[in-house]
């Protein structure tokens, strides 16, 4: 696992291309254009899963229009495991 804090949209693309992660966890409070970029990358990398987290209400939105309520940290792992591959 690595943590990055890209400075802009171009950096997001570069970091995903560089590290080719299986999962990107995205804070819902980041600017919308950045989320759009991450979702477009998920389309370009079919194995990439995108989870959008909201730390205020413990919700996780999995790219594929699924939503999970998290009660504990292991619920996040389960959300990644159960989420379908990106179409």
Image (cartoon, helix red, strand yellow):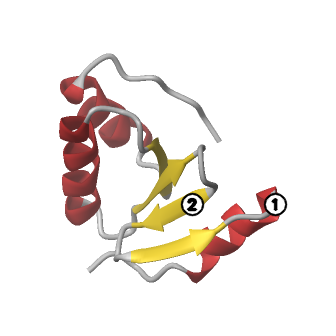
Residue 30 relative to residue 74: left or right: left
Residue 8 relative to residue 2: left or right: left
- Within the image, what quadrant is residue 66 found in? bottom left
**Which badge, 1 or 2, comes first in the chain's sequence?**
2
The residue tagged 1 is: 72
Residue 12 relative to residue 28: left or right: left
Cβ atoms at labels 1 and 2 below 8 Å apart = no
Q: Which mark is residue 59?
A: 2
User: Residue farthest to the top?
Assistant: 7
From the top left corner, tell me how far across and down residue 1 is, in percent. Answer: 65, 42
Q: Which mark is residue 47?
A: none
Q: Residues within 10 Å of mark 2 (few under 14, many from 20)?
A: some
Q: Residue at x 26, y 55 (%)?
A: 39
- Within the image, what quadrant is residue 15 found in? top left
From the top left corner, tell me how far across and down residue 52 is, in percent. Answer: 45, 54
Task: Please tell me whether mark 2 sits on a helix, a strand or a loop.
Answer: strand
From the top left corner, tell me how far across and down residue 10 is, in percent. Answer: 19, 26
Task: Please tell me whether mark 1 sits on a helix, a strand or a loop.
Answer: loop
Q: Residues within 10 Å of mark 1 (few under 14, many from 20)?
A: few
Q: Residue at x 27, y 32 (%)?
A: 31
From the top left corner, tell me how far across and down residue 47 is, in percent. Answer: 39, 68
Q: Residue at x 32, y 16 (%)?
A: 7
């Amino acid at each position: 696992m690595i943590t990055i804090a890209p400075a802009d949209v171009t950096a997001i693309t570069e970091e995903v291309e560089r590290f080719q992660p299986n999962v990107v966890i995205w804070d819902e409070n980041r600017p919308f254009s950045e989320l759009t970029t991450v979702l477009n990358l998920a389309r370009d990398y079919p194995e990439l899963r995108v989870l959008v987290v909201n730390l205020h209400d413990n919700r996780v939105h999995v790219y594929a229009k699924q939503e999970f309520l998290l009660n504990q940290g292991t619920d996040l792992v389960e959300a990644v495991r159960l989420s379908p591959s990106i179409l």
